């Protein structure tokens, strides 16, 4: 997802301004652009509440405002630098196949299993967090049990397993059960599936409406913000 820039074309606007207003225009325009960009960001965050089921803080805070100033009359609504290329908002905006997540890459490259692990989904017995996503606690337990952690020191060993005999056991069956990761709480318990394996990438249809929504906010809100900010700047300058 590329950033969306908001600019001011003041060539026609300047013809109807006094000298004092022209002098204050760059400062007022920068503030108006930042106000509009803030409105656009809030629109996208509200849109996430409609499109997604219980969006996480990570999702809602994936975008930011890059502020304009009087020397650079351009504000941007863009991804935070910390988000990186992996964020699924890119797919939600443009549609198409979702890239593998970090967990999927670890499982596909480090788990001994005869099939292809292209994507994973929480199973019916997975432990979920408040947003309906696979809980980070169980995710780490699974990666450790399967020897798939990035840091080998955090993987479960025979010695560490003996120190916690009551801890649930996670494993990947080679045959006889549907593909995935299973949990067995006690040795005699029936194993239940907590993670499903798939050899296909999830595909999304475009639904976020980032560009269309921001453009609509820009067209509707920028003129009002510019009038207000210019009046404020002129009043302070007198």
Image: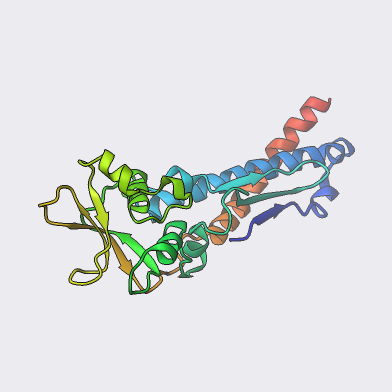
Quadrant that contains the C terminus: top right
In the depicted structure, whether residue 114 falls above or below residue 39:
below
Residue ID at (14%, 51%): 187
In the depicted structure, whether residue 128 falls above or below residue 236:
below
Q: Nearer the viewer, residue 1 or 215?
A: 1
The quarter holding residue 236 reads: top right
Residue ID at (52%, 67%): 94
Q: Is residue 189 left or right of residue 235?
A: left
Residue ID at (60%, 45%): 64
Q: Residue furthest left?
A: 188
Q: Nearer the viewer, residue 145 or 42?
A: 145
Q: Is residue 40 left or right of residue 96?
A: right
Residue 141 picture location, percent across and down = 33, 47
Q: Nearer the viewer, residue 72 or 78?
A: 78
Residue ID at (47%, 46%): 58
Residue 162 picture location, percent across and down = 26, 43
Asked if residue 129 shows in the view, the reply is: no
How is the rendered protein coloured?
rainbow
In the depicted structure, whether residue 200 falls above or below residue 138:
below
Q: Is residue 97 left or right of residue 157?
A: right
Residue 196 picture location, percent across and down = 29, 63
């Amino acid at each position: 997802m590329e950033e969306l820039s908001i600019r001011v074309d003041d060539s026609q606007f300047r013809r109807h301004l006094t000298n004092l207003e022209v002098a204050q225009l760059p400062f007022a325009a920068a503030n108006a652009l930042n106000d509009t960009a803030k409105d656009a960001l809030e629109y996208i965050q509200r849109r996430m509440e409609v499109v997604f089921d219980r969006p996480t803080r990570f999702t809602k805070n994936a975008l930011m405002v890059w502020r304009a100033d009087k020397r650079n009359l351009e504000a941007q609504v863009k991804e935070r630098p910390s988000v990186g290329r992996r964020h699924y908002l890119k797919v939600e905006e443009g549609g198409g196949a979702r890239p593998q997540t970090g967990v999927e890459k670890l499982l596909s490259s480090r788990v001994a299993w005869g099939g292809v692990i292209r994507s994973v989904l929480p199973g019916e017995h997975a432990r979920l967090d408040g947003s309906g996503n696979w809980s980070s606690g169980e995710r780490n337990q699974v990666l450790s049990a399967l020897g798939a952690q990035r840091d080998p020191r955090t993987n479960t060993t025979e010695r560490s397993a003996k120190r916690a005999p009551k801890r649930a056991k996670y494993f990947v069956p080679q045959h006889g059960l549907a593909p995935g990761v299973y949990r067995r709480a006690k040795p005699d318990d029936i194993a239940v599936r907590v993670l499903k394996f798939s050899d296909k990438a999830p595909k999304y249809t475009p639904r976020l409406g980032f560009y269309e929504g921001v453009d609509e906010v820009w067209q509707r809100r920028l003129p009002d913000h510019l009038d207000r900010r210019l009046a404020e700047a002129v009043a302070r300058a007198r």
